[in-house]
Amino acid sequence: MDNKKTILCFGDSNTHGYNSSNRGRFTEDERWTCLLSEYLGNNYSVKEEGMSGRTTVFKDPLFEGLDGISYLFPCLMTHEPVDLLIIMLGTNDVKERFSATPQNIAKGLERLTQKAISSTEAWRNKPNILLIAPPPIEKEYENTDVSGEMGRGCAQKSKMLASFYKEVAKRNGCHFLDAASIEGIHMYPYDYMHLSKESHKLLAHKLSTLIPQIC
């Protein structure tokens, strides 16, 4: 009998492991999800479910299938029984074409969270969710190639997400982590919106100390 606890990591390109230094993907020796699996050891099974461009609930008019709310239930059921769901989303929600305020994005996260809670068939015991406010986009993104894709105001909006996310977590009985609070974490200076290699390691280390306390 497999007694490993299943941790499902549901996110966007920063969970997928996008490497903006070469527009590729970090290796399994570098991605925070894989490092987390290594740090936690054999008692846990860490599932990667990161997808570039994913939002909480917003349907992208340019690309199909990127709204997290449409995929969350089948994703949970694919990996059931789940012991802990980690959600780190919101970076793509700040794109200008969605015209969403930080409050709107937090409501999207809350809807996604409640969808996970209501997916009772997926949980081994009871819903157990960790909401992570992603590290904010840095203002310098405006001078990179991603500025046209992201649009205006992204850095300011992303910096405001953590306080709203914390309230969402509190209202819904979830755990919360503000990734920006991790000492040394930063974005690569190629687009200022994707985690550096070192930051993947820092995030994995922080989670490896937190998870045994909650799962």
Image: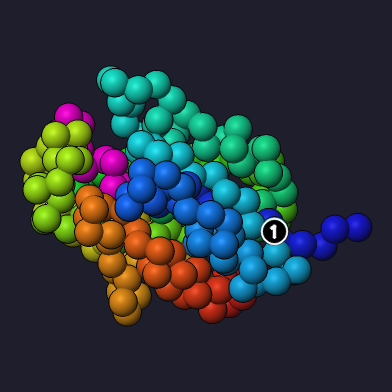
The answer to whether 213 appears left or right of 189 in the picture is right
Please give the count of numbered marks on the rendered protein: 1
Magenta region: 89-100
Q: Is residue 166 visible?
A: no
| Residue 100 position in % (x across, y down) | 18, 38
Quadrant containing the C terminus is bottom right
Q: Is residue 104 magenta?
A: no
Q: Residue furthest front?
A: 22
In the rendered image, which quarter is residue 200 located in?
bottom left
Name the element at disc 1.
strand
Amino acid under disc 1: Ser
**Side of 127 where 111 appears, left or right:** left
> How far across and how far down the image is residue 162, in percent?
27, 61
Front position in the image: 61 or 128: 61
Q: What is the crowding at mark 1: few (fewer than 14 residues within 10 Å), some, or many (at least 20)?
A: some
Q: Residue at x 8, y 41 (%)?
A: 152
Image location of residue 111, percent across then percent down = 39, 41
Depth order, front residue of 57/23: 23
> Residue under circle 1?
45
| Residue at figure coordinates x 32%, y 52% from the top left | 21
Q: Is residue 203 left or right of residue 213?
A: left
Give me the residue at 36% from left, 48% from top: 22
The image's colouring method is rainbow
Quadrant location of the N terminus?
A: bottom right
Query: Between 186 and 2, which is closer to the camera in this rendering?
Result: 186
Left or right of 214, for residue 12: left
